[in-house]
Image (spheres, helix red, strand yellow):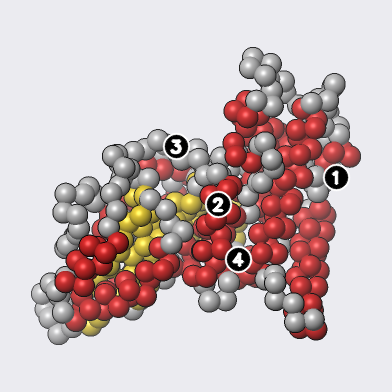
Amino acid sequence: MVEWCLPQDIDLEGVEFKSMASGSHKIQSDFIYFRKGLCFGLACFANMPVESELERGARMKSVGILSPSYTLLYRYMHFLENQVRHQLEMPGHYSHLEAFYDDKKGVFPAGTLVSQQPIHWLPSIHNYMYPEMKITHPAGCMSQFIKFFGEQILTLWKFALLRKRILIFSPPPVGVVCYRVYCCCCLANVSLPGIGGTVPESKPFFYVNVADIEMLETEVSYVACTTEKIFEEKQDLYDVYVDNQNVKTHHEHLQPLLKINSADKEKYQRLNDQRQMLMYSQEVDGDCSSCEEDLFILFFMEQNNRIFQTLMEVSASQDKTLTADHARGMGLDPQGSQVKIMEKQKTFEVIAKESGIFKKNQRKRLQCSDFS
């Protein structure tokens, strides 16, 4: 139940299921990023044993805030952690929360919390999000993300770049898994002049549960995490399901993308080589101007820019044909990239139409005759 809120007339229907992850009764504390309408929330959860039959031996609460953007929410995590502990020990004392609201309050645009209109995440905004968000993980969330998935990071990259519906399952705690959602979105960044601003970014929905099923049924692209195992059976809600380090898809035409091919192995090796060079320069030369987080973000952005640049050049050519050489130039495997090229083609055509690369009523399909 929602025990207390400010402002009191705000629509918070369902927020109690977002701010307290399913299965949280098994853990002592957690933090949760989530989406409510077009706003984002951060909630800190805590579980305290009590000698009360009415509360069945445990008192569990979450204290959270909502904002139109998630980029600065991390700044208030320490406050929320303290407040949820305060609420467990002294239930019903809201003076600190009232003072916080009076100091930080803002007015949400009309309909912000309930609108279901599509969101477009511009790279300029996304790049601004990155330096703020990385601070929230003491070891660097992107570094941990890549170390956790290893070569499978290239599989996630492909699905993120194709704007597929990606659902990450994990039992609680879910805080670190919310970072994986964010990092997965970062894999798809594009910054090309003239096209970057029209590329719809991967949408981070962060934590979702069964109360979000109706909303997810309308989405064509998202990245989210859940603690609800039942989602695995609801295959109409997602394209890609990630359980621990196991990435799978039930779509037959996407199955080939699960295989780590030679081009993927080469990219992963190059990423590791660049990381080793960075660590060496930091140790020997004392150069701390760059960090692993920057390296990983820029590595994938460069890959994505190269793909879109090649697609733009082919779309402007006479025969509009993608060849095996084009595939290699984009860092793809010519023998195993047909599915990705055809899928990417669909994405690119939508983007091209929006950005004016193709004139109205003159969209032409790219050919893939040279791919096996």
Q: Which residue is mark 1?
A: 328
Classify 10 Å Cα crowding around label 3: few (below 14), some (14-19), many (20 and above). few
In the rendered image, residue 267, in percent from the top left (x then y), is placed at 79, 58
Q: Which residue is mark 4?
A: 142
Per the model, the C-alpha gap separating discs 4 and 3 is 26 Å
Relative placement, left or right, of 20 versus 117 is: left
Instruction: Mark yes or no: residue 325 visible.
Output: yes
Q: Is residue 346 above or below residue 84?
A: above
Q: Which residue is mark 2?
A: 126
In the rendered image, residue 153, in percent from the top left (x then y), is placed at 66, 59
In the rendered image, residue 252, in percent from the top left (x then y), is placed at 63, 40
Identify the element where label 3 is drawn.
Answer: loop
Count of all numbered marks drawn on residues in the image: 4
Q: Which residue is mark 3?
A: 118
Identify the element where label 4 is drawn.
Answer: helix
Q: Residue reaching furthest front? A: 103
- What's under tag 2, amino acid-wise? His
Identify the element where label 2 is drawn.
Answer: helix
- What's under tag 4, amino acid-wise? Met
In the rendered image, residue 192, in percent from the top left (x then y), is placed at 69, 42
Disc nearest the viewer among 2 and 3: 2
Per the model, the C-alpha gap separating discs 2 and 3 is 16 Å
Q: Residue at x 59, y 28 (%)?
A: 354
Q: Residue reaching furthest left? A: 54
Per the model, the C-alpha gap separating discs 4 and 2 is 15 Å
